[in-house]
Structures are given as C-alpha cells and as structure tokens.
Amino acid sequence: MSSFSRRKLITAGLATTAGAAGLAVAGRLGARYGLVPPDCRGFYGPGEALTYAAQRIIAPHALAREFPRSMISKMPFANVVRGLDDAFHRTETAGFADWRLAVDGMVAHPLSLSLADLRSMPKRSQITEVACEEGWSYIAEWIGTPLSDVLREAGVLPQARYIVYQSFERPWWDSLDMNDALHPQTLLAWGMNDGDLPVGFGGPLRMRVPRQLGYKSVKYIVRLTATESMKGFGAGLGSAAPEAGYAWYAGI
Ligand SMILES: Nc1nc2c(c(=O)[nH]1)N[C@H]1C(S)=C(S)[C@@H](COP(=O)(O)O)O[C@H]1N2
Ligand SMILES: [Mo]
C-alpha cells in the first residue's frame, strides 16, 4: 500500500473513531500516545490533531527531500528583516564573538555555547528547500550542527517532550516535539552555500527544519529550552503561529 493511501486510511480511521466513540476517547488515546499537538484546542483542533497523528504514525523518521548542488537557487529570496535592533547590530559589528546559545530547562547540564563551540562539534550539511506558507520557496545548502547533538551534550531529560527555541528578534519563537528535534535533518545552521550564514537568512544562527514550512525555521536563535509542557510559553499553544491562526505543526 502506498504511504498516501495508508495515510488516508489511518486518517479516516482516526476520524471514524472520533465520530463513533466520541472525541473525548480519541483525545485521551491521542494524549496517551503523544499524538495531540499543543495547539489542538478541545474539540475541533481535530483537523490539526489528525494531520499530526497521521504523520507521527506513518512516517516519524521520514527525510525531507535533498537536492543536487546544481539545483541551489541562484537568487534566493530572503524576507525583509525589521525586528533587529541596535543590540543586534552591535554584536554583528563585533563579528558575533559574544553571540551565545543558551540551552536550559529540563536538561542535566545547562549550556552556553558560542558560535565557535557549535562549529567545533560534528557538522552536517544538506541541500533542502525553504517553503514559505505564502507560496514562494528556494533551495540552498545549509551547514550546521544537528540539534540532536546539542541536546545530547546538554543531557535532555527523558520527561522532556518539546524543545522551545527563541529568536533574538522578538517576538519570534517556536517549538518542536522530540521527534522533530532529534530528527537527523533538523539543524542549528551557521553556514549557507559554503559561506557564513548571512544576516538576511538568519545569521549567525538559525533553526532549519526542512520537514516543516519555512516559518518553523526561526532565525537568530539564542535560546533552547527543554520542557514537558507548553504551558507558560506564550499562550501555551506551542508557538506564536497558532495565536496568529497558523498551525503549530506545519509538516510538508
Ligand atoms: N526571526 C525570524 N525568523 C523567521 C522569520 C522572521 O521574520 N523572523 N520568517 C519565517 C518565515 S515566515 C519563513 S518562510 C522563513 C524564510 O526564510 P528566509 O528568510 O531564509 O527566506 O523564515 C522564518 N523564520
Ligand atoms: Mo513564511
């Protein structure tokens, strides 16, 4: 059976369970098996919950498509950056020597990593597409440190369910479940197309989550927090996106 028809079947199955036995039961089962996204509000977040659950059941370790070097976009589009203040431009002028990535929350060893620390760890590169929810996209090579390596170094506790990441540029922040946080293609990227990551594309450090829409790839990352629950982070929905009407889980 193709993964597409399996997906339809499982989605239909979950929907039937939801309709027949009541969403309360589906909700309890989903919560028990880690299938409910944090922005699923009560009853009819189920659209969100079904997409998320289907992805989690069918393809928890699927890889985003990687492209040949010849397909790297010649003139990639970068969003205009408005939220960077004088403090950012001071650290930029200093070559980001004082840039630190804090790793805290449910970890055995909280960390404060410089860019040099990150670059000294094993690196990975990938040629993947940034797909914006508005319809445009581009392909680039991303070079960075797998988020999983940073989390391993910090000793994330087994109770942690989400990794929250925060940008220097307010109010940008988001979170990933552990499945996507530990995914081999999820990078803390500090390089792009064989050079440093330009500020326009999130330099000196951005999250790259090629399995989800572009807005999950938050730029200017300064803090990672491991947590068991999204309560207490913004409105508790997992990121700023659902507060603005977008999905927390933006799988592609
Ligand atoms: N800090 C920050 N991160 C961000 C954004 C932003 O405006 N600020 N835009 C997001 C959106 S909507 C998309 S589609 C991608 C775009 O990536 P690009 O700027 O490399 O094109 O970055 C995401 N990360
Ligand atoms: Mo976007």
Image (cartoon, helix red, strand yellow):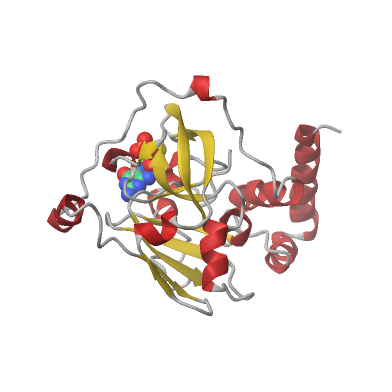
15 left or right, relative to 177 = right
Q: Position of residue 71 (x, y in %)?
A: 50, 21
Tell me the quarter of the image containing the N terminus: top right
Q: Which residue lies furthest to the right in this view?
A: 1
State whether residue 38 appears in this view.
no
136 left or right, relative to 220 = right
Question: Residue 62 appears in which quarter of the rendering?
Answer: top right
Q: Indicate which quadrant contains ligand 1.
A: top left
- Against 162, residue 187 (above or below) is above
Work out whether residue 14 or residue 211 is closer to the camera in this orientation and state it: 211
Work out whether residue 238 or residue 78 is closer to the camera in this orientation and state it: 78
Q: Residue at the spot x=19%, y=56% of the render?
A: 91
Q: Which residue lies furthest to the bottom in this view?
A: 108
State whether residue 89 appears in this view.
yes
Q: Position of residue 78 (x, y in %)?
A: 32, 33
Work out whether residue 120 or residue 15 is closer to the camera in this orientation and state it: 120
Tell me the quarter of the image containing the C terminus: top right
Q: How many marks?
A: 0
- Against 71, residue 64 (above or below) is below
Q: Residue at the spot x=44%, y=27% of the render?
A: 138
Q: Which residue lies furthest to the front in this view?
A: 120
Q: Position of residue 192 (x, y in %)?
A: 40, 37
Question: Residue 159 appears in which quarter of the rendering?
Answer: bottom right
Work out whether residue 81 or residue 90 is closer to the camera in this orientation and state it: 90
Q: Where is residue 149 in the image (x, y as percent from the top left)?
A: 55, 60
Question: Residue 181 appears in which quarter of the rendering?
Answer: bottom right
Q: Residue at the spot x=59%, y=53% of the render?
A: 180
